[in-house]
Amino acid sequence: MEYWVRTSVFVVPIGCLLFIFILTAVPALALDKLRISYASVTGNTAVITYVAHRAGLFEKYGLDTEIILITGGPASISALLNGDVDLDLRAPIAAIQAISHGAKLTFLLSQSNTLEYDVVTRPEIRDVKQLKGKKIGIIRFGGISELMVRYLFQKLGLDADKDIAIVQVGQARFTSLERGAIEATVLSSAESAYAKRVGFRVLDMPALPFFGSTIVTTPVLATKKSDAVTRYMKGYLDGVRFFFNDRERSSQYIGDLLRTKDRDMIELAYKTNPQHQMGRKPYPDMAAVRATLDVMGARDPLVKKLKAEDLFNLSYLTKLDQSGFIDQLYAK
């Protein structure tokens, strides 16, 4: 015997109600998970991804993104190769070194094609010649900060091996500078602008080509999770649009990333972000990539053998660009 239930609108069999209940009780399909590591809270490498994450843009494209802080390039490379993370956001130095020694890694785009670092000195240093024989602070040997010291001081006419003393001070470069433990360091543009505001000197430097920041993954993951990577790229590119079009909320998210409420520092971080130079389409400048390989190759012969174009898998970016996806984001 079939039982019927009267609802406020119409009469339906009780079996249909059970079927409807079952359908409505089924949870929404789970979003694909991507674990994304980043280098530090002070740099530019994580800004667009973090802004897109906070704005819900990855969810919009069916992704559940987890943002994980991993300090140190070697640790991040190990996490990628072990499958502990899917993507990594940072300067490409450690990845290039690993690739030159046989590691299977690839870059998806460029987040910076010009050098975004400055030489910052104590206030009593008025001329680059005064840095001869002085202590210059870096985060760690073999990392981006050491490479920047060597590159920038070479451009200033000083030999990093003979004319200065490079000192490893960890993340506390600014504190070491304040205390006089070092006479100079290299800082990102936002950090150096803040340092200048509080009384330190920033040496004038010409605009220099440099491959300063990227998104790293493994070819295996790019193949295995190709659809998820495509959707990540959609969310990232939508994040670029959001960064340009919603300055107020982007600045709020940048402040959260930097863990500061200092409005001046947040404003500097937004204004000096290299995305303003990169524009809507984050293609690498191969001349900048080759300049970076040349600097690294001076100390690592294996890096000299690498070709700039071979470091990238630009298929995701190119397909989205050619499909009109990027242009359509700005047509809304």
Image (cartoon, rainbow, N blue to C red):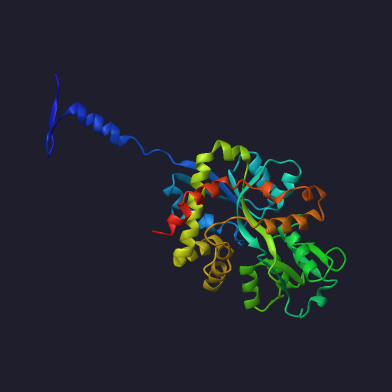
Task: Decide if residue 210 is in sight here.
Answer: yes
Rendering coords of residue 234 (x, y %): 48, 50
Pinpoint residue 216: horizontal percent, then vertical percent. Answer: 62, 48
As rendered, which of 156 and 70 lies closer to the eye? 156
Q: Please, is residue 134 above or below residue 90 in the view?
A: below
Q: Position of residue 110 (x, y in %)?
A: 61, 55
Residue drawn at (79%, 54%), measured in percent from left and top? 297
Q: Number of numbered discs present?
A: 0
Q: Nearer the viewer, residue 66 or 322?
A: 322
Is any atom of residue 65 visible in this view?
no
Residue at the outermost right position: 162
Left or right placement of residue 10 versus residue 141 in this view? left
Which quadrant, please, contains the C terminus? Answer: bottom left
Q: Where is residue 127, by image quadrant?
A: bottom right
Residue sitting at x 69%, y 59%: 288
- Give residue 119's quadrant in the image: bottom right
**The one of 43 and 236 positioned closer to us in this rendering:** 236
Vertical placement of residue 209 versus 97, above or below = below
Residue beneath the point at 74% across and 57% down: 140
> From the viewer's perspective, is 84 left or right of 33?
right
Asked if 75 appears above or below 41 in the picture, the reply is above
Give the position of the N terminus as an image quadrant: top left
Q: Is residue 190 left or right of residue 289?
A: left
Residue 315: percent from the left, percent from the top? Answer: 57, 45
